């Protein structure tokens, strides 16, 4: 069964796209991430032009993060105030990111930068998370109480000025690192087509010491807006959002996400983090291998209409 | 915008360049044979289940020499050439252990698809020089580099890479038995439009050869257009990009919200 994608201008097998959407949706529901870091490379691997994949991936992230955020909202695990501060940084970052995107595209090294960013970020984040979760699991095995948040232990982040009280998260924190984190993630969103949940979640837990229970919901909350903004900016500057592709992906994605959430609830926090870490590491290593092994063909052709 | 501009450009090229070219190319004055071709449609619609299309072209040779025809000395080549656009070939090299695009070359206005059909292998129809002059076949396609290419020593390798990649991806193809005579002067040619065919103005060209010498040529335009919803979406994306982006986001909001409502009831 084929379906013609009007913006990507090619015919694809609808079952493969549905399968990709469902699989990524399942994982995103399970781990509470948008899934952009998985869907964009998958689409590129399936011959969708990278510019279309980045912009359309962001659109699918909007749907899956809304679906996830609503669930968290009902449970009361979103800190709207914290999310809004993150968002302000995020929108500024996304604007810079779009500018950076066109700059790199002009130089002709956008695909390299995207690959390197993916490899560095995914393997660093994946490695750190895996280390932390294994340590936590060991301690759990020895029946030791583990807390991610060690109240007595403050790092340099907590010495910054412009402090604000975030009631829901029960923390008193400077807005500078929060908005700064949002800013960095915003850049990544528009350059890499990812929501940034896979970086945001660990950064909020380990760097800002925000309680784990509000982290996922709050990160999803701000990802909705940053990725929606990216979609609109990409649509109006590059005309690369394929609404047909996005719709097929998001239908499969939101359904997959619902089952993912159920599986995720059955697992313990550190087990979930270890699995997410493995997934993130696997994608990072896969991309790293691609950069290192000799390519099948050292030449590639891109048409002026699309491509980097 | 790029697509629109390109279509407009292709139309312009057809309108102005074709007649000028026709004066030089259409007929070889030394011969009396005439070539006529026709296609069943001048427009191919891309629908949501588009999987490529086979196009049949009918043609007739007038004023042929019966004896030569009987000996199979007439040969016909039919090509279907897609819209033209610049194409960039990039070459990767290993830099500090990773593979990076280090050099590139852009070729000016090359067809995005090219399907060739002939009575037999084009290399045996006419000498390479003749085919080269006419620009028939992937091997003879004009690949003019854009901008500064240094001493041009790597021109050959980039051209070869371009042809090889386009042929293996299926957008450039050839069928050396695709043209058949169905009666003494009537012939039928089939050419293939690949599934990832670029929309825009394609050109069907037929060439008649007698004893390895070019006799006559004819060209017809073929428009490949999106229809219905596909057309509407493309138009919306290019003419109302902001609204289109907002609609895309709204669609995502409804889908995400809808899913959580439906699954909540369970």
Image (cartoon, helix red, strand yellow):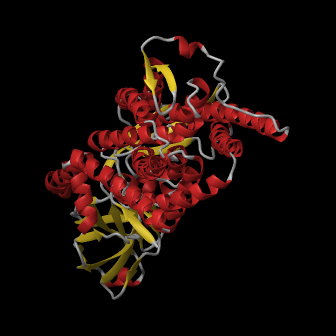
Identified at 27% across, 70% down, the residue is B45
Left or right of A308, for residue A153 = right
Tell me the quarter of the picture where residue B106 sits: top left
* Residue A105 place in picture, x, y as percent: 40, 32
Q: How many marks?
A: 0
Left or right of A255, for residue A202 = right
Q: Is residue A34 above or below residue B103?
A: below
Visible residue check, residue A112: yes
Tell me the quarter of the picture where residue A7 sits: bottom left
A17 or B174, nearer to the observer: A17
Q: Is residue A18 above or below residue A66?
A: below
Identified at 45% across, 27% down, the residue is A166
Identified at 33% across, 59% down, the residue is A6
Residue located farthest toward the bottom when viewing the structure as drawn: B183
* Residue A253 place in picture, x, y as percent: 49, 58
B124 or B188, nearer to the observer: B188
Tell me the quarter of the picture where residue A132 sits: top right
Left or right of A290, for residue A217 = left
Visible residue check, residue B3: no
* Residue B217 place in picture, x, y as percent: 26, 65
B162 or A185, nearer to the observer: A185
A211 or A176, nearer to the observer: A211
Identified at 22% across, 72% down, the residue is B32
Q: Is residue B248 above or below residue A122?
A: below
Q: Is residue A297 above or below residue A178?
A: below
Left or right of B192, for residue A197 = right
* Residue B216 place in picture, x, y as percent: 26, 66
């Amino acid at each position: 069964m084929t379906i013609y994608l009007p913006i990507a201008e090619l015919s694809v097998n609808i079952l493969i796209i549905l399968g990709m959407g469902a699989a990524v949706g399942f994982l995103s529901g399970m781990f509470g991430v948008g899934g952009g870091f998985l869907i964009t490379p998958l689409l590129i691997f399936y011959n969708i032009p990278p510019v279309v994949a980045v912009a359309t991936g962001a659109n699918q992230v909007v749907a899956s993060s809304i679906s996830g955020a609503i669930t968290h909202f009902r449970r009361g695990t979103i800190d709207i105030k914290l999310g809004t501060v993150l968002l302000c940084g995020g929108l500024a970052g996304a604007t810079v990111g779009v500018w950076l995107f066109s700059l790199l595209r002009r130089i002709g090294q956008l695909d390299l930068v995207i690959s390197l960013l993916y490899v560095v970020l995914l393997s660093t984040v994946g490695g750190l998370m895996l280390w932390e979760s294994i340590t936590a699991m060991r301690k759990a095995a020895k029946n030791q109480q583990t807390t991610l948040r060690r109240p007595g232990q403050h790092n340099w982040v907590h010495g910054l000025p412009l402090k604000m009280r975030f009631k829901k998260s029960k923390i008193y924190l400077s807005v500078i690192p929060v908005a700064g984190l949002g800013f960095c993630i915003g850049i990544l969103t528009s350059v890499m087509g990812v929501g940034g949940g896979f970086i945001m979640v660990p950064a909020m837990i380990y760097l800002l010491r925000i309680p784990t229970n509000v982290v996922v919901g709050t990160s999803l909350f701000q990802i909705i807006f940053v990725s929606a903004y990216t979609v609109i900016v990409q649509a109006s500057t590059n005309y690369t959002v394929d609404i047909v592709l996005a719709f097929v992906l998001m239908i499969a994605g939101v359904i997959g996400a619902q089952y993912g959430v159920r599986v995720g609830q059955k697992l313990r926090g550190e087990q979930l983090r270890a699995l997410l870490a493995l997934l993130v590491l696997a994608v990072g290593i896969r991309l790293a291998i691609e950069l290192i092994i000799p390519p099948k063909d050292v030449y590639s052709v891109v048409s002026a209409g699309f491509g980097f | 915008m790029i697509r629109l501009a390109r279509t407009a450009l292709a139309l312009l090229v057809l309108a102005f360049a074709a007649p000028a070219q026709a004066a030089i190319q259409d007929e070889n004055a030394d011969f009396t044979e005439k070539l006529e071709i026709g296609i069943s449609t001048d427009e191919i619609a891309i629908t949501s289940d588009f999987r490529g299309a086979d196009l049949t072209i009918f043609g007739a040779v007038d004023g042929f020499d019966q004896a030569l025809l009987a000996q199979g000395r007439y040969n016909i080549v039919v090509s279907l050439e897609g819209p033209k656009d610049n194409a960039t070939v990039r070459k990767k090299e290993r830099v500090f252990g990773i593979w990076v695009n280090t050099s590139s070359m852009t070729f000016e206005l090359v067809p995005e698809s090219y399907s060739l059909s002939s009575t037999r292998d084009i290399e045996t129809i006419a000498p390479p020089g003749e085919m080269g002059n006419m620009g028939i076949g992937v091997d003879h396609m004009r690949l003019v580099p854009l901008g500064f290419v240094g001493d041009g020593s790597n021109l050959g390798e980039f051209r070869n890479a371009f042809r090889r990649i386009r042929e293996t991806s299926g957008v450039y193809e050839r069928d050396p038995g695709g043209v058949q005579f169905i009666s003494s002067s009537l012939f039928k040619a089939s050419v293939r439009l690949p599934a990832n065919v670029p929309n825009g103005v394609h050109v069907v060209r037929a060439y008649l050869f007698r004893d390895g010498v070019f006799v006559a040529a004819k060209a017809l335009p073929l428009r490949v257009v999106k229809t219905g919803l596909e057309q509407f979406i493309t138009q919306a994306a290019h003419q109302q990009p902001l609204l289109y982006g907002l609609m895309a986001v709204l669609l995502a909001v409804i889908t995400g919200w809808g899913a959580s409502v439906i699954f909540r009831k369970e």
